[in-house]
Amino acid sequence: MNDIIDKNSKKSSIKRIDRYQNRVVKESIKYPLDYILVNPDEKKIDRGFVARSSRLKNTIMGVVLKNRIIKNRPKLSDFMRIYAEYKENDPGMSKEQFQAKMRQFYSGVHIDNDQDDEKYQQLAEKFHIIQKEMYNQQEELNDIITDMDQIADAAHKVDDKKKKKDRHETLS
């Protein structure tokens, strides 16, 4: 009986709710908080209080979510690492070109993907050649597997004939 009382006591329920709230706040998933759980048996609460509390929670969670977005932005060290990689791969790229690329990437501006990119075309050609070669190799492998199956079938037939012949000689 004590277990049931402890399980349903007010303190343990509040602790579980607090732990759940803490876990939810630490996650990066957004949850709507336009409600407040009210147990009518405990106290009488007017609708104005519920509405004000709900607005307060939503306001605070809005600030928390904005802080998360700001915190998730790339740091200067990330930019420096990416810049070093770009410089290593393309030594001709200037600092201004890199900055323009990063601004365009993080600004959310629409990027025209329809323009011809020479490097992309070369890469696409290489992938096409590799795809053709892999297709040809797959066909050759299929032919080899078919030949191996035929050889195995022929070997089984010869083996069966030999076994029949041995049985026939044993019986005679």
Image (cartoon, rainbow, N blue to C red):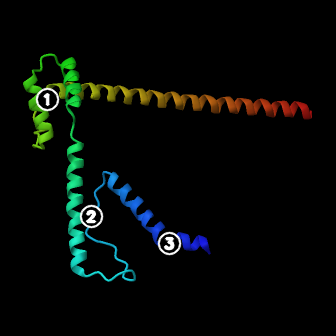
Query: At label 3, which amino acid type do we have?
Result: Ser
Q: Which residue is mark 3?
A: 9
Q: Considering only order in the chain, which callout, 2 or 1, is on the residue closer to the N terminus? A: 2
Image point (39%, 80%), residue name: 42
Q: Which residue is mark 1?
A: 117
Query: At label 1, which amino acid type do we have?
Result: Asp
Query: At label 2, which amino acid type do we have?
Result: Pro
Nearest to viewer (mark 1 / mark 2): 2
Query: Image check: 119 left or right of 147?
Result: left
Label drawn at residue 33:
none
Nearest to viewer (mark 3 / mark 1): 3
Residue 170: % across, % down: 90, 32
User: What's the CA distance linking mark 2 and mark 3?
Assistant: 28 Å
Label drawn at residue 32:
2
Most foreground residue, 40 or 120: 40
Most foreground residue, 41 or 31: 41
User: What's the CA distance linking mark 1 and mark 2?
Assistant: 43 Å
